Amino acid sequence: MISFEAVIIGMQGRILVQDVSFSIMTGEKVVLRGRSGSGKTTLLKSLVGGARITQGVIRVNGLAVLPENIQRIRQDLAYIPQEPIVSQETAAEDLLLPFTFKAHSGKEPTAAQIEAVLARLLLDPAIFRQKSSTLSGGEKQRLVIARAILLDKRIFLADEITSALDPESKDAVFSFLLESEHTVLSISHDPEWIGRCNRVFTIENGILREEK
Amino acid sequence: MEALDIPLARFALLYLLLLLPLYFLQRLKLGLGREVLMSVVRMSVQLFLVGIYLKYIFAINSLLVNILWILVIMVVANLNILKKAGLAVRKLFWPSLAGVACGTLVVLGVFLFLVVRPTPLYDARYMIPLAGMLLGNCMNGNILSLERFYSGLRKSESTFLSYLLMGATLKEAVHPFMREAIRSSLAPTIASMMTIGIVSLPGMMTGQILGGSFPLVAIKYQIMIMIGIFSSLVISMVASLYLSLPFAFDRMLMLRPEIFAGKKKG
């Protein structure tokens, strides 16, 4: 569960998010929409400590987003930006990057687990040997989601992820994110995505309201 | 054998030589004339002042004075590094200074105590120019590496955040940015080592030959200084980057916008 309790976020003397209070239950699919610069991404990043909160409390699974809890909170969250981050030489290296970090060392997924995840996202296993730079936007997006699944992430923060997706990728991403038990907090202007989310919020001039 | 001194009247001719490049710059309408004149004036005044200081420092030849001199030039170099890298002096002064000191002093120690062994070991004729040469190169390298590292992190905040969300520690998350910053900052030094002696005779060696040294002695010093520059550069870059981390990131492990000079967005 995620909750924002009277949260105010300011940056450079300007208030981006004013007195926001709402909560998201486990498994809910939520979308935020609003004009560019309205504070949507800031709100999303505040959940993972990527934006400083001026006032109020944000909780993820009961833990306040504070320095002492941030590592535990980050374990549950996956952030999927508009431009998927694939920085390694090959798709395999990108998929397995987290397992090179101390936190996950020795916990590498088996070949069968990897295959299952790739199949769930309609990714050809041959992609594994491909150079990351040759992947399409949709493939990169799905690779990033596959990485989050392998890390057993429970909450997905998705920032405009459908804008660069081809129809095949869109189907795979939609069916995974919307039909699984994962909690999804997204930013989108895509009517199809908005139409399939449980709850829709609009942010305007820093004020958040839920559309009924 | 000593180098021939240049009489003042003939020395002044050198400045007349500048008329030629200034004419070309003017014809090309590059608008660099004022800047070139300023830099020539500054270079001349600075070097004359250094010449005067060094004359006294060499004459005094005291360990304390030498150390003080090196400390002063280290502080000046450090201020220049942070200013040129666009970083806030009050936030990163100490870690950056410590990095520069590590790179310079370790290599200077090897030069003086193990390789050259002048008598006395702190002989100003060796200690001061060698420290200056190492420091000058560390300064240029650190400007590049700090600027590239922190501007890279600022530009790719989402990438950095995604590493943290994948379970990376701060050191693991900054590692790709550090690798890139060091690689690109070392490229000019590596390239210069590749071609040195083929195209040009380096300044130190030329100076020694003109000063009366045998070419083979000058070459030994030049090799020593090239290896020293490279080593001090790597040590100071790595030390400055690592030592600056605790000052540059907050407890959420996010980059502090305050480390950037001016009011740039964080």
Image (tube, coloured by chain):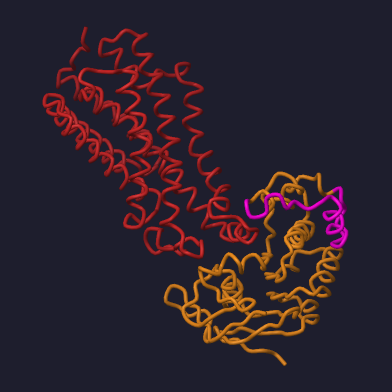
The quadrant holding residue B208 is top left
Give the chain coloured orange. A
- Asked if residue B57 lies left or right of residue A69, the reply is left
Q: Is residue B2 magenta?
A: no
Q: Residue at x 51, y 58 (%)?
A: B154
Q: Position of residue A64 (x, y in %)?
A: 55, 76
Which secondary structure type mostly characterizes the magenta part of the structure?
A: helix
- Asked if residue A108 lies left or right of residue B198, the reply is right
The quadrant holding residue A179 is bottom right
Q: Is residue A104 magenta?
A: yes
Q: Is residue B224 above or below residue A187?
A: above
- Asked if residue B79 lies left or right of residue A203, the reply is left
Q: Is residue B67 above or below residue B205?
A: below
Residue numbers of the magenta segment: A102-126
The quadrant holding residue B118 is top left
Q: Residue at x 41, y 19 (%)?
A: B223
Q: Position of residue A79 (x, y in %)?
A: 66, 66
Farthest residue toward the front?
A106
Give the chain coloured red. B
Q: Residue at x 72, y 93 (%)?
A: A212
Q: Is residue B106 above or below residue A41?
A: above
Q: Position of residue B54 (x, y in %)?
A: 17, 28
Using the image as rendered, state which of residue B20 and residue A49 is in the foreground: A49
